[in-house]
Image (tube, rainbow, N blue to C red):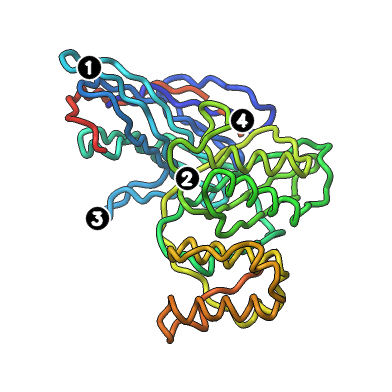
Amino acid sequence: MNVIGIEVIKRNPGVAIGVVAGEKIELTYGDTLRVNVSFDYRGLAGSATLYGSIGQRKPVIGFDEILDSEVSIDLPESRDDFIHCERSVDIGITSDISPGTDYDIEAKIEEYMPETLVGIDNVIDIVGIPPTYELIQHTIYPYAYIYDGDVEVTTATFKSDPFTPAAWLADKFASKLEEEVRARGGRPIEVKVYVDTTPLFWTDFRIEVVGTPLGAGVASGIAVGIPIWLAIILVALAAIAVILVTYHFIIKPLTLEHKPGLHEVKPGWGKETLMLTIHDSEEYWERPLTPAETLEGMSEAELRDYLDQIAEEEVPLKAVVSWLPLAIIGGVAVLGVGATMAFAMAKPKE
């Protein structure tokens, strides 16, 4: 595989700046590094994961990743001849990396390692002062206290326009996010919103969303080419009148265990939340769904007792107390460097 170029779109004013091949790239916080690669492919049509990272190569331990990102790429069918392919992956420059010089980059196709691993050393300088983000919203959804299993973690960083209202409508954002996720067959687990208010005219946000995986075939109403979780976040932001100028996102898989804390928060749930959580619980544990009219006829106290009953039947006794609580509530520059490697790929992994 060959790194054929690096692009950087500066966060302000948002235009590409060319860099002479072989020269270093200077990046600051809010920029986005785009790593362009090329490779020769032969095999069946399918998809793979292009992974890019910024870090430092160290003795003994090897490459120490600091920032990373991945993107799904399409592979064309070619059973006889190699086909030349060019793809790219974007890496956002966040406060996770410190100011410094001589950072390195690596890129690889995860399903075809180590044949595709390429790197460029001493090519990135990070300048500026890292933003300090303040947590302004933390919402834990009911499903967080039921669900054990695989989740998708989406981190989106973006800059809003200077005319966006300063007040953050936390409840409305959380509600719209849940509505969009449920409409596509998923369940939200948790969302955190951070803000950096140090810029004079611009406001930088970071949103971290954890939710159950959204598979293929659930992208109804979403523009082609936009990842589902990102599109959901954009819809929820539009609901609170946030206008984005630039944004960057990373989506990663994770395995989650349910959160503890039922007895501290369950007394504050309203009837609608209790009913929804009962149906989520029954669906998750494959129990018969209680008719909505039956739940409607129950008091809040009876609904809470029914949740306790489900917990006692489905969760080991020692874990009951921790079962089901709720706290509801960029820029891109250009550099052409790299080492070429042509490779034949077998049938893509399914």
> What is the spatial separation of the Cα atoms under label 2 and label 4, in whole angstroms?
31 Å
Amino acid type of the residue tagged 1 in the rendering: Ser
Foreground: 279 or 236? 279
Image height of 262 relative to 67, above or below? below
Q: Which residue, as the protein is rendered here, is positioned at the far top?
A: 81
Tags 1 and 4 in contact by the CB under 8 Å rule? no
Kindly identify which numbered label has been placed on residue 214: 2
Q: Residues within 10 Å of mark 3 (few under 14, many from 20)?
A: few
Tags 1 and 3 in contact by the CB under 8 Å rule? no
Disc 1 vs disc 4: which is toward the camera?
1
Of helix, strand and loop, which one carries label 1? strand
> What is the spatial separation of the Cα atoms under label 2 and label 3, in whole angstroms?
39 Å
User: Where residue 233 appears, x then y in whole percent?
Assistant: 62, 43
**Image-quadrant location for residue 335:** top left
Q: Which residue is mark 1?
A: 78
Label 1 vs 3, first from the N-terminus: 3
Label 2 vs 4, first from the N-terminus: 4
Image height of 2 relative to 139, above or below? above
* Residue at 17% over, 30% down: 346
Disc 1 vs disc 3: which is toward the camera?
1
Image height of 317 relative to 158, above or below? below
Residue 213 visible within the image: yes
Of helix, strand and loop, which one carries label 4? strand
* Residue at 61% over, 82% down: 263
Kindly identify which numbered label has been placed on residue 17: none
Q: Which residue is mark 4?
A: 10
Tags 1 and 2 in contact by the CB under 8 Å rule? no
Horizontally, residue 177 falls left or right of residue 316, namely right
Q: Which residue is mark 3?
A: 60
Label 1 vs 2, first from the N-terminus: 1
What quarter of the picture does the C terminus occupy? Answer: top left
Amino acid type of the residue tagged 3 in the rendering: Val
